[in-house]
Image: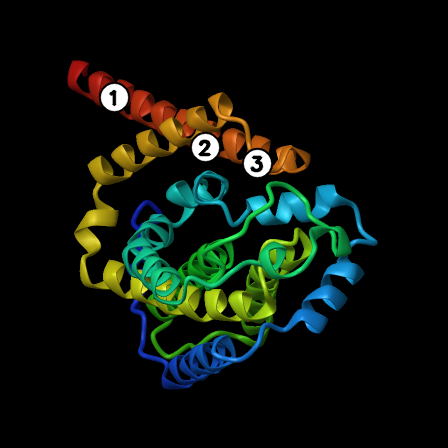
């Protein structure tokens, strides 16, 4: 009979090279690069922005802040307790994501909508931005996090199923749950991207490019954590990561957001970040107490 892995151990998720996924993302990126060489999609931008204006600015401010690096990391911080590989995968996605964003922004130096269209003709929420439009950094961050987390979690579930029963694949209920999780996660990332159009900060092509670059960055982050499991499986590494999240949460308390109507997203990040670190500290205190008690016996 096959033994189940101890509940306290995390099973490493092996991230396969999904050629279909890579092909779709590369096609999207090539399409975005081509469209960027064409005249801006003014009519499409104005139509999408006008449609979004029927909803509360608080909704779009909340969603757009979920693509802010500091808010995004703290909101995701509970993953450090539940699935540390996923949280480290998000961090490992930063190098490729940042590099692609900085390189493309410097290469194209694309003007934002407010530069080419009178801001009085569309809805602007938050700061009025003018330069470095392509690609959308918020969209890139959202898709990088979504793909990194999904790659780790989905493969982790498969690994746990095989570890429990080697001949078993994901059952139909598990497959439905996994599909729903993927749809919800990627759907939320897409809403973050759309919010950048809703707040008047980006063209549709910027969002497409951000989604493509972010997806590649997220997959790279998941792959890196597969290659170097000692980092995310280390209690020291997890503890240090938690302290960085705490500092990030405190920084958000002291620095006002560019989107005050989305304060709920910032508050959520602060609660998640502080709560995660407090849970870490409590676990360490409890473990220290257990070790002290065992030595005294």
Q: What percent of the width, then of the height, locates residue 103?
A: 32, 62
Q: Earlier in the sequence, mark 1 or mark 2?
A: 2
Residue position for label 2: 273
Task: Give the residue at x 49% y 25%.
Answer: 255
Residue closest to the eye, 142 or 119: 119
Circles 1, 2 touching at the beta carbon (< 8 Å): no
Determine if residue 157 is in view.
Answer: no
For the C terminus, the image quarter is: top left
Residue closest to the eye, 19 or 45: 45
- The Cα–Cα distance between marks 1 and 2, rounded to whole angstroms, is 23 Å
Residue position for label 3: 258
Task: Give the residue at x 39% y 41%.
Answer: 81
- Depth-wise, is mark 1 or mark 2 nearer the camera? 2
Locate residue 293: give its quadrant.
top left
Residue position for label 1: 288
In the displayed orientation, state which residue is furthest to the top: 296
| SS assignment at label 2 | helix
The reply, left or right, for residue 96 in relation to residue 268 is left
Q: What percent of the width, then of the height, locates residue 2?
A: 30, 67
- The Cα–Cα distance between marks 2 and 3, rounded to whole angstroms, is 20 Å
Q: Bin the neighbour count of mark 2 within 10 Å (Cα to Cα): few under 14, some 14-19, many 20 and up.
A: many
Q: Earlier in the sequence, mark 2 or mark 3?
A: 3
């Amino acid at each position: 009979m096959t033994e189940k892995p101890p509940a306290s151990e995390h099973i490493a998720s092996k991230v396969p090279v999904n050629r279909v996924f890579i092909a779709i993302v590369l096609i999207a990126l090539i399409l975005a690069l081509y469209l960027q060489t064409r005249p801006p999609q003014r009519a499409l931008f104005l139509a999408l922005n006008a449609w979004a204006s029927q909803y509360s600015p608080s909704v779009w401010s909340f969603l757009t802040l979920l693509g802010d690096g500091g808010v995004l990391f703290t909101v995701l911080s509970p993953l450090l307790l539940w699935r540390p590989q996923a949280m480290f995968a998000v961090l490992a996605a930063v190098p490729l994501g940042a590099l692609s964003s900085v390189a493309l922004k410097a290469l194209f130096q694309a003007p934002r909508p407010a530069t080419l269209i009178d801001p009085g003709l569309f809805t602007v929420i938050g700061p009025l931005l003018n330069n470095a439009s392509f690609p959308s950094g918020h969209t890139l961050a959202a898709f990088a996090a979504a793909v990194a987390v999904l790659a780790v979690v989905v493969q982790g579930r498969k690994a746990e199923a095989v570890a429990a029963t080697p001949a078993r694949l994901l059952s139909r209920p598990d497959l439905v749950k996994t599909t729903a999780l993927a749809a919800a996660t990627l759907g939320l990332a897409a809403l973050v991207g759309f919010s950048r159009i809703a707040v008047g900060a980006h063209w549709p092509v910027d969002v497409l490019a951000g989604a493509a670059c972010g997806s590649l960055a997220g997959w790279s982050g998941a792959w890196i954590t597969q290659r170097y499991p000692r980092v995310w499986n280390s209690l020291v590494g997890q503890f240090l990561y938690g302290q960085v999240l705490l500092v990030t949460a405190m920084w958000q308390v002291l620095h006002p957001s560019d989107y005050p109507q989305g304060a709920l997203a910032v508050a959520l990040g602060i609660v998640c970040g502080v709560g995660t670190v407090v849970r870490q500290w409590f676990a360490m205190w409890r473990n220290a107490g257990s070790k002290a008690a065992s030595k005294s016996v």
